[in-house]
Image (spheres, rainbow, N blue to C red):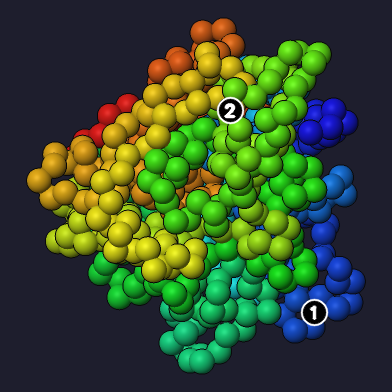
Amino acid sequence: MNNNRSITARWLLASTAWLLSCTAPFKSYNTDNTGFPHTKQEYDLNRYGLNMLIIQKGIYFNYDWGGGVNWPFQVMQNLTADMFCGYFHDCTKELFAKNSVYNLDEGWTSSNWINTYGYIMPAIHKSEAINSQAGMTPFLGITKILKVAVMHRIADQYGPLVYSRFGTDTGSDPETLQEAYHQFFADLEEGIRLIQTFITTNPGTESFHKFDLLTRTKTYDEWLRFANSLRLRLAIRISNVDRVRAGSETRKCFQSGIGFLQAGTHLISVDAASGIYTNPLGEINKSWGEVFINANMQSFLTGYEDPRLPKYFETAEGNSKVINKEDRISYRFPIERTYAGIRQGINVKHGNYSRHAKSTVAKNTNAILMTPAEVWFLRAEAALRNYTTESPGSCYENGIRASLSQWGVGNSINSYLNSNKTPAGYKDAFESRFDISAATGITPKWNDDEPDQRKLERIITQKWIASYPEGVEAWSEQRRTGYPKLFPVKENNSNGTIDTGIMIRRIPFPATLRSSNPCQYDTLLKHLGGADNGGTRLWWDVGYNIL
């Protein structure tokens, strides 16, 4: 990562902080028309769909605001959630001393909030207004679904936020995370209703397909299934803190008659073949060489001999004869053609990990947001919590089947389902002080006779593997459940704000709010109910599982 990108991120903070004013109306700030002049926006429903292209590009952020389309994603997600969840780590020596050791870089942690509120929420606000005024019910319905898809990711990283009152003339007052979740459910239900109403009166019409960057079938049916699946995700998210609401929302999912994302047919991912979106993780990985396998991923996938491993990562280049004479660092053992990873929190002063195993994600790789496999694991947990009468074990195994098939290794299903292999310990290629034993002995094979907590660990561990490479969702679920069990950071430089054993729980609000918008910041802090640092738990993160 180049220093000028970090400087630009700080400039962005200062230049867009005014957007977060308590009294700002948030109207018409977004001017990106995705290449369409104003006169052409009235043709072919462009006026109603152009903002929705911006929104879809902004979930797995690759929106062109004029300062580059890939490095913002690195500071927004790749150096935060993607690393904290145990998926990735950078090898650049300047970065080991920052987020990796919980010495959080304010410019990085602020960027997700700033960019989403500066560019994507205004597009959502405009899309809601335009499509509501024009009576474009299916487009309005999809906007409601997209709004939840975008903003629950912000809520699950920061906590309280501005959501339902965004863009109002009387101000943009924050709401608690609990209030936001209630509105998420309401918006999903409204989105579903609007699309179903349109389908009833316009059967066979797929007017949104030309703007659709997320669904595989480009149909309203898949959008309904996505909304229903997203509702199940959020219902399970609050299951430890609001069991009644979690159960009622789960039952709505099953009683709706909509169904869920189905393996082999549906997949929610941002289309990198569209010509207007490229996968930013792929640019960071293939062009910059800064996306390596995290030691946690190495532990689970190598220990399980997981058939998805070569689909997720390339083997290490390595070179056991190379010695960094300046730091006198040499390889302890050859790593060529292995999946050598990097442990978080080691704070080294060299860049010798640059020949370790890298991700396979490229610029033309679709950016996965939600899979049928995830839905099956959600159903497994719902059954485990007695929200449904389904079999937890059957749903769990269906999740594995769906994921292995998705990645083209379906011929390994039977052996994997019966595997008693366990995660491997980690050995650092350069220094033995970074070595650590496996954090758990959980296996892929289901066992109906085990305690429910053990079953939950197995479900979430496999969901974590199957959710790759979408780190925001993986990190949220790891914090909610404590699974999979991850390696603690070796060095913790948070000045006591983050407990090494408990690990980082959230991302702080932008520091500029304290001076530029103290009324909004004070309200956010009040709703958070704790210090504005990485150690404060969110509303749904209670520190234990209630089954």
Viewer-side residue, 141 vs 113: 113
Q: How crowded is the residue under tag 1: few (<14 C-alpha within 10 Å), some, or many (20+)? A: few
Q: Nearer the viewer, residue 340 or 473?
A: 340
How far apart, in angstroms, are the residues tagged by discs 1 and 2? 63 Å
Q: Which residue is the site of mark 2?
A: 333
Instruction: Determine whether, in the image, residue 496 is placed left or right of residue 453.
Output: right
Task: State left or right for residue 160 relative to residue 254.
Answer: right
Of badges 1 and 2, the one in the foreground is: 2
User: As rendered, which of 125 and 231 lies closer to the eye?
Assistant: 231
Quadrant hosting residue 514: top right
Which dot marks residue 42? 1
Residue 208 visible in rendering: yes
Q: Quadrant of residue 290?
A: top right
The residue positioned 84% from the left and 47% from the top of the image is 68
Q: Position of residue 29 (x, y in %)?
A: 79, 51
Q: Residue at x 72, y 71 (%)?
A: 274
Mark 2 residue crowding within 10 angstroms, few (<14) / some (14–19) / many (20+): some
Pick the residue in front: 100 or 247.
100
Q: Residue at x 43, y 87 (%)?
A: 200
Percent position of residue 139, x then y: 59, 73
Asked if residue 389 lies left or right of residue 522, the reply is: left
Q: Which mark is residue 403?
A: none
Q: Residue furthest left?
A: 449
Q: Position of residue 359 (x, y in %)?
A: 63, 48
Which element is circle 1 on? loop
Disc 1 and disc 2 in contact, CB within 8 angstroms: no
Write down the quadrant of residue 118 in the picture.
Answer: top right
Disc nearer the start of the sequence (1/2): 1
Amino acid type assigned to the residue bearing label 1 in the image: Glu
Q: Which quadrant: the N terminus? A: top right
